[in-house]
Image: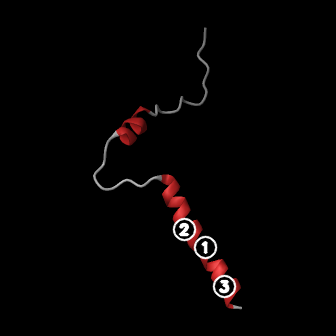
Amino acid sequence: MSKKKGAPLPASSAGLLRFFEDDTKGFRLDPRLVVSIPSSIIVISWILDILST
């Protein structure tokens, strides 16, 4: 019985999981906050632009 020569299997992602499970120092931000603040700044600037014309 001969072995098939194919592409090697992908590397395990265990190292990535372990990396992201570690707690890092610094403050953590809620993703909703990160999206809502720039979105609200854009909407406010559009409103101000419309009202100033």
- Quarter-of-image position of residue 27: bottom left
Q: Nearer the viewer, residue 26 or 40?
A: 40
Q: Residue furthest front?
A: 51
Residue at 61% over, 79% down: 45
Query: Residue 16 or 12: which is nearer the viewer?
Result: 16
Name the mark nearer the viewer: 2 or 3: 3
Q: Residue furthest top?
A: 1
Which numbered circle lies on residue 49? 3
Tag 3 secondary structure: helix
In the image, what residue type sits under mark 1?
Answer: Ile
**Residue 7 picture location, percent across and down:** 59, 31
* Up-down relation of residue 3 to residue 1 (above or below): below
Residue 42: mark? 1
Residue 38 got which mark? Answer: 2
**Residue under the point 37% across and 38% down:** 21
Q: Residue at x 63, y 72 (%)?
A: 43
Q: Position of residue 6 (x, y in %)?
A: 61, 27
Looking at the image, do the residues carrying marks 2 and 1 touch, with CB atoms under 8 Å apart? yes
Task: Report the Cα–Cα distance between label 1 and label 3.
Answer: 10 Å
Q: Say which element carries label 1.
A: helix
Q: Is residue 26 above or below residue 10?
A: below
Q: How is the image coloured?
A: secondary structure
Amino acid residing under circle 2: Pro
Q: Quadrant of the C terminus?
A: bottom right
For residue 49, which quarter of the picture?
bottom right
Neighbour tally class for label 1: few under 14, some 14-19, many 20 plus, Cα within 10 Å: few
Per the model, the C-alpha gap separating discs 2 and 3 is 16 Å
